[in-house]
Amino acid sequence: MTTLTEGQPIVRRGRLSLNRDAWRRILIGIVLLYVSVLVLAPVAALILGAFAEGISAVVTALTQPEVLSAFWRTLYIALIALLVHTVFGTIVAWVLVRHHFPGRQWLNGLLDLPFATSAVVVGYMLLLIFGRNGLLGPWLAALNVKVAFALPGMILATLFVTLPFMVRELMPVLEALDVEQDQASATLGASGWQTFWWVTFPALRWGFIYGVTLTFARALGEFGAVLVIGGGAQGATETATLYIFRALDERQYVGAYSAALGLGLLSLILVVGSDLLRRREK
């Protein structure tokens, strides 16, 4: 009886270990299935669709003048959005973390508005402001400035939908950063710019890199807002995502799949590349 009694906890621990191991495997299986259905399956479908007629058809589709024009326009808009948010997103994050002022909480909440607002609604709101019959339409027409159905409107739409990424990546890092280092730098005679560049920025660099990566990737994939405010005119306001939409509508499936695969791979390279760089530093 004594031996059996003493052995019972051992058996229970073994069963508990088996249960934990089984649950761990089940959770891993659920995660793998979830990611496969939402990510790997669509990517596989894109690859199969793009190469259905061979690699030569992919090359031909991606080297068409209208496709190259759409991709260059996409990159141009994305780079402008990236440059603007790199500067002003960093400033906004700094002000929200390091300064307290009336309306700070409201401003902080408004930054998440692009997450909660449909991109199509964003484009429509811009039309109500900058369209021919919009709030500022008559004034813009008098100045011969075109915003709606032109690149400026598409840039504004992309700026809006990419607004939160840089700020939200930098704010947690700034909140965790000890201000004593900045104060020590100022005590030693460093200017505000020197303090930021040599003390603050090195501590922010990974939040900064992730913010840049997510902002650029999001700008590359914007569709709804630029469609409404830009109109998708071929050769004028058509971006890569709008070309994919048009190609599908015209049953040019190889071109649509190839362009979508190209955009997806570019975004994947950006995100995975930044993660690999951080791992190498560690």
Image: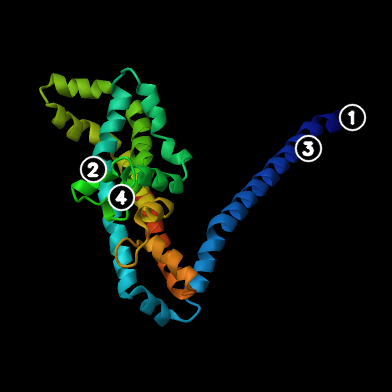
Q: Residue 181: name its quadrant.
A: top left
- Nearest the viewer among 273 and 211 is 211
Say which element carries label 4.
Answer: helix
- Nearest the viewer among 231 and 92 is 231
Say which element carries label 2.
Answer: helix
Numbered badge on residue 139: 2
Cβ–Cβ under 8 Å for marks 1 and 4: no
**Mark positioned earlier in the residue sequence (1 or 4):** 1
- Image location of residue 29, percent across then percent down: 64, 52
* Badge 4: residue crowd in 10 Å (few <14, some 14–19, many ≥20): many
Q: How is colour applied across the structure in the image?
A: rainbow
Q: For the point 34% across and 70% down, which residue is it?
A: 67
Left or right, 139 with reference to 163: left
**Mark positioned earlier in the residue sequence (4 or 3):** 3
Q: Quadrant of the C terminus?
A: top left
Amino acid type at mark 3:
Val
Amino acid type at mark 4:
Gly
Q: Residue under label 4, please give it.
A: 153
Q: Residue under label 3, please give it.
A: 11
